[in-house]
Amino acid sequence: MLKAVKDNFRTHIQTVLDKNVYDVGAYHDENEFPYLKLRLNHLRASHAKDTVIMNVIFTLDLFSKYTGEQEIIEMVDDLINSLPEFIQANSFITYCYLSRL
């Protein structure tokens, strides 16, 4: 299930932002900015009879050559606005939220 959540979220981010999203730290192309990296930050799983509830926290690192915050703020706005669509498309996800920026 964790792999499906990460793969689906990664694909969603790529679609919404029209950017490649990596899960490795090294830049693939020095000219490819903004550079986005999605990584697992925390996982807590609870079990109750036939139900598994997972609280998954991902960190999305956004690296930009832009000297201000404008580019990153625009990407975050687009991503936040797309979260209801992401939840609807993935019936096994109950909620999403932005923890910090």
Image (tube, rainbow, N blue to C red):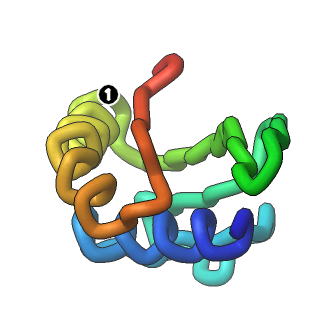
Considering the numbered disc 1 on the image, is that residue within a helix, a strand or a loop? loop
For the point 48% across and 60% down, which residue is it?
Answer: 92
Residue wearing tag 1:
69
Write down the quadrant of residue 94 in the picture.
top left
For the point 28% across and 68% down, which residue is it?
Answer: 89
Percent position of residue 7, x then y: 58, 75
Q: Is residue 43 visible?
A: no
Task: Please state, as top left, top right, bottom left or bottom right, where the N terminus lies in the image.
Answer: bottom right
Write down the quadrant of residue 59 in the picture.
top right
Percent position of residue 57, x then y: 67, 38
For the point 41% across and 37% down, which residue is it?
Answer: 95
Vertical placement of 10 versus 64: above or below? below
Horizontally, is 15 left or right of 4 in the view?
left
Q: Is residue 39 visible?
A: yes
Give, as a three-letter code, the residue at label 1.
Answer: Glu
Q: Residue furthest front?
A: 49
